Image (cartoon, rainbow, N blue to C red):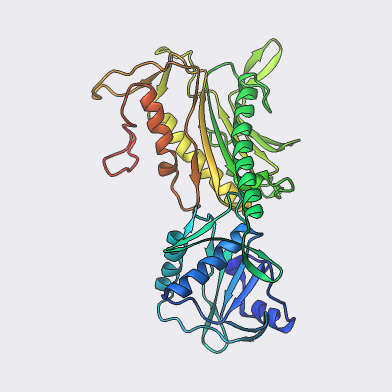
Amino acid sequence: MILKNINQITAQDLQTLIDNSVLEGKMIEYKQELPGNSDTDKKEFLADVSSFANASGGDLIYGIVEDKGIPIELKGLTIENIDSEISRLENIIRDGIGPRISGVAISKPICLLNSKVALIIRVPKSWISPHRVIFKSHDKFYSRSTTGKYPMDVGELRVAFNLSETITERIRNFRVDRISKIRANETPVPLVDTAKIALHLIPVISFNPAQRYEISRIASHPEKMPPIYQSSGLSRYNLDGFLTYYHQEDRVEGKSRFYSYVQLFNNGIVEAVEGKLLNPKRPAGLYIPSGAYEKALIKSVSDYFGVLKLLNVDLPIIVFLTLIGVKGYYMAVDVTTVGASETIDRDILPLPENIIESYNDSAENILRPCFDSIWNACGFSRSHNYDASGRWIAK
């Protein structure tokens, strides 16, 4: 794999591979031409892509002639409609591999001196492998070694499935553990004693034991990570990473209490907790402000996705939303809404997770299943803040 952002790779970088005779291997493969539309070409292409995902990730480089795995010429490609060609390749990958691989990137065309172009497909290591080629009757799993791709045997498949299940279990256990600590107020800053909204953005790659990010890039711009329902806050480093938090509420038993915080862990996990939106001390009592809380969460998810993108955190990312201490709360809606809100019948609402496979996904779409579930808990069929076409239009 070329150690550069895929869209910053130049023709000179590719020529350097040739000059240094960088051999094909576990993380790089050269192709003279793009795959065609024949079944054979598509099967070969899908085997290449899935093998990278099931191993350590890597780059498929198109436009280089190779001889026994050694690159010998930067010949380039002639492509009439690059957008159409990229769309074709993306469709083949999406429809021909299961489960879908998140984070596959296709480079911008790399212009060469001969007026042709090269193209790179970067496949990340998948943490929810193994991925299988499911094109027509070609039903196989592939991985890679230093000599290239190969079909996985039964033992390798068993290890891969066990690893995937272990990571899924660890992610869910992490959420349960963090919610338990939030309830017990074992948090980076002591919070006010109110019902709370807890938001977790958990990149699957964060459970790689060696995974750490350069969080100083965020620490130098804390305004990029404001607490939920706030435009700014205090900030500091802590043992787990970097923290932003909203100002002091009052003192209880001689201790400061705060409304909210956002914890960016060193491994890329984001935990945001908010205790003001569901404040039970308001005159109307225990209610969820139907528009305000959705608006605040949409903004925060968008903000925190920007943080993770800036850190170059690999997808997929699992989004969890949890309401804590909400038994007896109802949904506050406007007077034109038909039907009365029921009260929530449990203290904790652990809402279904949502797996995000693209940084282009909108926060409104990401959160809609969570919002619908909260409205369900209050006796409604769905969130009333979305129109018939699924567009968020808070009333």
Q: Residue furthest top?
A: 253
What residue sits 66% from the left and 49% below the top?
159
Instruction: Please name the residue shown 43% across and 34% down the image.
Output: 370
Q: Position of residue 290 (x, y in %)?
A: 38, 27
- List x then y, in percent, for residue 353: 49, 37
Quarter of the image where the C terminus is located: top left
Give me the residue at 28% from left, 44% from top. 389
Q: Give coordinates of residue 57: x percent, y percent.
A: 63, 61
Figure disc tally:
0
In the picture, which quadrant includes the N terminus?
bottom right
Place residue 225 in its image quadrant: top right
When asked about the image quadrant of residue 243, the answer is top right
Q: Residue at x 48, y 76 (%)?
A: 35
Residue 6's place in the image compared with 231, above or below, is below
Residue at the extreme bottom of the image, as rendered: 114
Q: Is residue 369 above or below residue 138?
A: above
Q: Nearer the viewer, residue 93 or 259?
A: 93
Residue 41 vs 346, above or below: the answer is: below
Residue 188 picture location, percent across and down: 69, 28
